[in-house]
Amino acid sequence: MLYKFKSKAAGDLIMLEPQGQQFLQIIGKTPGPQGIIEADEMPAAMAALQQAVSDQEAAQANAVAEAKAQGQTPPRFEAIGLRQRAKPITDMLKRCHQAGQPIVWGV
């Protein structure tokens, strides 16, 4: 399944199911076939995304530091992290919030 996020204030954004579900869970929405993010919910969604990015990067840095301290090979992570995946939706959230337009999916 694909998630297609749409708004009158921004171009459509398509995400694969795992990334779409992760995004929706981070911002506190129930992943499903349809939904809406109202303009007044967008600042909290952007803050939640930024916090999730910071948490992921801190956890990865800690894992690398711990492995090095134990003389082990540092773990490898996905080449594309949450920071890169969150950038397009964060931009969409900013544009839509400024325009006062909701973002919908599955409609």
Image: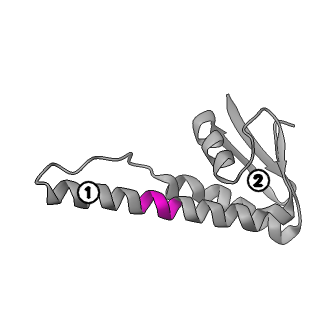
Q: Which residues are magenta?
A: 53-57
Q: Main secondary structure of the magenta part?
A: helix
Image spot of residue 50 (x, y percent): 58, 65
- Report the front residue among 68 and 6: 68
Query: Residue 16's quadrant in the figure?
Result: top right
Q: Is residue 15 magenta?
A: no
Mark 2 residue type? Gly
103 vs 90: above or below:
above
Q: Is residue 59 visible?
A: yes
Crowding near pointer 2: few (<14 within 10 Å), some, many (20+)?
A: few
Q: Is residue 5 left or right of residue 77?
A: right
Find disc 2 in the rendering and name its residue.
11
Crowding near pointer 1: few (<14 within 10 Å), some, many (20+)?
A: some
Image spot of residue 22 (x, y percent): 60, 44
Image spot of residue 42 (x, y percent): 77, 63
Which circle's residue, 1 or 2, is located before the other in the chain?
2
At a point 83% along the width and 42% down the height, the residue shown is 35
Q: Nearer the viewer, mark 1 or mark 2?
A: 1
Q: Is residue 94 visible?
A: no
**Picture colour scheme:** one colour
The N terminus appears in which quarter of the rendering? top right
Q: CA distance from mark 1 to mark 2?
A: 38 Å
Find disc 1 in the rendering and name its residue.
64
Indicate the secondary structure of the residue bearing disc 1: helix
Residue 93 is labelled as none
